[in-house]
Amino acid sequence: MRFRRQSARLLPLFLMLSCARPALAGPLPPCLKAVSSNNGNFLVISDVHLEPKLGNGARVQQVSLQVFPKENFINAKDRLTSPATYWTNRVQWSVVLDSSNAHPVPACPLSLISDDGEFLIVLNMHAAGSTGSALRIYRRRDHLGDPIREGPDHGVFIKDITLKEIWPADKFPNVEIVTDETPQWFAGGTFEFSPDCRVLVHKTRWGNKVRINLEDGSVSGTGKAN
């Protein structure tokens, strides 16, 4: 009888300790404010606009990605000699993501900018399935002699590139169940722009390489590792 009474007293304590254990979840992905081109000549700043909701919540309404060129101090009288890098306060061109062109609107966009500042790649961190968009290609509107229009230079959308165009076909069954610990589709791979900044080369975690033509979005080289 005494054993039963002790067990009854210990049971609530056991339940309380069990409920107090934290739920297992992966660490949150980094939320990046800026990214530079490999040569350091261009900087992309992410600006997130939130829409307040009832209570203390908020929803991402719009995200703008603004491309800034490096300040080269053309006038000798203004030149500052320093190892630091300085950026102009003039937006060269930008991309705006909202509910009309992005589902969902990314709260923490992850992007790449070519060394000539002409192409912006926005990676989709929520890509899933063979038809899911993995990345989007944008280019500067007055790219290579295009007629310059009045007003802000908003980037031109080129194409969505799907996982099916990037991954080997036999890898999709391995990612049907997605958890907090599931690697992002680009994890373990690499990205590199061609010397002329017209092709993005992605090597997947399995070793196969794909070449993405940034001017038209065509993809080549999928399949076996090389």
Image: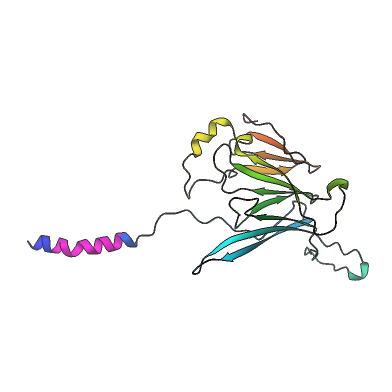
Rendered image coloring scheme = rainbow
Give the residue furthest to the left.
1
| Any part of residue 47 in sight | yes
Of 137 and 149, nearer the camera is 149
Count of picture labels: 0
Q: Position of residue 168 (x, y in %)?
A: 59, 32
Q: Quadrant of the C terminus?
A: top right
Q: Position of residue 203 (x, y in %)?
A: 65, 38
Instruction: Assess whether residue 46 is covered by the magenta stretch.
Output: no
* Residue sitting at x 60%, y 35%: 164
* Residue sitting at x 92%, y 70%: 77
| Any part of residue 207 in sight | no
Vertical placement of residue 74 versus 115, above or below: below
Vertical placement of residue 125 versus 164, above or below: below
Of 34 and 60, nearer the camera is 60
Q: Quadrant of the N terminus?
A: bottom left
Give the residue furthest to the top.
224
Vertical placement of residue 20 versus 145, above or below: below
Instruction: Assess whether residue 7 is covered by the magenta stretch.
Output: yes
* Residue sitting at x 84%, y 50%: 142
Q: Position of residue 125 (x, y in %)?
A: 58, 49
Q: Position of residue 223 (x, y in %)?
A: 62, 29
Quadrant position of residue 198:
top right
Which is the main secondary structure of the residues drawn in magenta? helix
* Residue sitting at x 85%, y 67%: 81
Judge from the rendering whether residue 207 lies leftward or rightward of residue 83; answer left or right.
Answer: left
Of 144 and 179, nearer the camera is 144
**From which residue to which does the magenta span run?**
6-18
Give the residue furthest to the right.
76
